[in-house]
Amino acid sequence: MKEHDIKKVVRENYGRVAKQSGSCCGSSCCGQTSGPLIAEYASRPREVGLEVGYTEEEMQSVPSGSNLGLGCGNPTALASIKEGETVLDLGSGAGFDCFLAANKVGPKGKVIGVDMTPEMTEKARANATKAGYKNVEFRQGELERLPVDDGTIDLIISNCVINLVPDKEKAFQEAFRVLRPGGRLMVSDMVLLKELPKAIRESIDAYVGCIAGAELKGRYLEAIKSAGFKSVSVIDESVVTLDYLASDPIGQVILKHMKGTGIQPNEADRLVASVKVRGIKPT
């Protein structure tokens, strides 16, 4: 698929999730229009949140409707957010991680969320207004062309979004540009541990579901380093095993999807991993 087509598909699918999450968004509802993988995530946000590292207290501390269950980690937990900082969330969705960060930076700090999906941006702004957040701002834009000034950000977070970006090198270059010297990058994302079978690589559902667009782990880390970041390291990694897929509702959707492609289930064993990666912009 061409870059324009990929973005169109991603924007449409996540736009539907944003619209439907306020009403039904169970697998019988979202699954018909949003793709089976993200529909399964969005139908059980609390369970997914607990699985990827959020606490019950954190999920209760943000506006209802901001947690759509679409992350693969909790970047705010390991980012050491300080009071008064300016934080940027790449692919902010309905604002879940932004609101968690806003609680930590306090009234003297600021959080900016950027998302390319109009429906997500609108939903995030509504959530902020509803809950009375004054230190959060949501902007519509693409990660390869961030609507953010140079050198104005202390910390960048992102949660399972950069795998959806066709030009990951450009996204990390933009992240480097907007950070202040000494600024930090903390992303949770999906990476590949081996090359994808062709049928999965060319699947629209697998791309929207954060699989087909994922990069090999080594290439992903090199893209961060090439952008200029130093001290790049994986501080946590969770490999997706076949046993996990078979026992997890989301994994079952993946395996079910694979049946129609002729791919054997064991080909999904240790194919992808959820990682938390940190980098620093040199001073």
Image (cartoon, grey):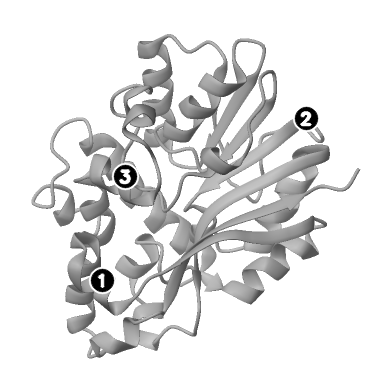
Report the residue marked by disc 1.
245
Name the amino acid, label 3: Leu
Distance from disc 1 to disc 2, alpha carbons, whole Å, reads 41 Å
Dot 3 or dot 1, earlier in sequence: 3
Q: Residue furthest left?
A: 28
Quarter of the figure with the C terminus: top right
> Can you say whether 102 is above or below 234 in the image?
above
Q: Residue at x 43, y 9 (%)?
A: 132
Q: Quadrant of residue 231?
A: bottom right
Quarter of the figure with the N terminus: bottom left
Say whether residue 238 is visible. Answer: yes
Report the residue marked by disc 2.
152
Residue 244 placement (x, y as % from top left): 27, 70
Dot 2 or dot 3, earlier in sequence: 3
- Neighbor class of circle 2 (other Cα within 10 Å; few <14, some 14-19, many 20+) is some
Residue 139 placement (x, y as % from top left): 55, 30
Report the residue marked by disc 3.
50
Q: Residue at x 26, y 35 (%)?
A: 19
Q: Quadrant of residue 152?
A: top right
Q: Nearer the viewer, residue 193 or 12?
A: 193
> Cβ–Cβ below 8 Å for labels 2 and 3?
no
Q: Residue at x 30, y 66 (%)?
A: 205
Distance from disc 2 to disc 3, alpha carbons, whole Å, reads 32 Å
Nearer the viewer's eye, disc 2 or disc 3? 3
Name the amino acid, label 1: Leu
Q: Secondary structure at mark 1?
A: helix
Q: How many marks?
A: 3
Residue 149 placement (x, y as % from top left): 76, 32
Say whether residue 137 is visible. Answer: no
